[in-house]
Amino acid sequence: MYLPPHFEETNTKEIKHLIEEFALSILVVNTSESLVANHIPLMLLNENVLVGHIAYNNDLHRNFIKNDDALAVFRGEESYV
């Protein structure tokens, strides 16, 4: 993902705040079947662990294996000046 240094957030308190404030993530998983993206609410369990719930009827829980690569995208406020 392209992220210019001036937009990169490194303050862990601010990152935690953003995840708490905007918990609906886009969870992108590279499964053995394909690349899959789902809107999944996630919470920060600790500094390095996100937890959430994937519905039983969502096939993601069948295809998401422990070692699959995943990316959680959290969107904050949007504006344009």
Image (cartoon, rainbow, N blue to C red):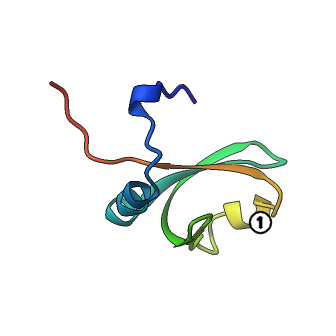
Q: Residue at x 47, y 55 (%)?
A: 25
> Label 1's element?
helix
Image coords of residue 72 (percent x, y): 56, 51
What residue is at 77 percent from the left and 66 percent from the top? Answer: 62
Foreground pick, 60 / 25? 25
Q: Taking 29 as reference, is 38 left or right?
A: left
User: In the rendered view of the protein, which quadrant contains the C terminus?
Assistant: top left
Q: Is residue 75 positioned above or below 53 on the image?
A: above
At 81% from the left and 63% from the top, the residue drawn is 66
Give the quarter of the figure containing the N terminus.
top right
Residue 12 locus on image (x, y percent): 46, 57
Question: What residue is at 78 percent from the left and 59 percent from the top?
Answer: 63
Look at label 1 and name its amino acid. Arg
Residue 46: quarter of image: bottom right
Q: How crowded is the residue under tag 1: few (<14 C-alpha within 10 Å), some, or many (20+)?
A: few
Q: Quadrant of residue 7?
A: top left
Give how far across and how far down residue 29 sits, in percent: 68, 49
Residue indicated by mark 1: 62
Along the line of sight, the residue nearer the viewer: 9 or 20? 9
Say whether residue 61 is left or right of residue 1: right
For residue 65, which quarter of the picture? bottom right
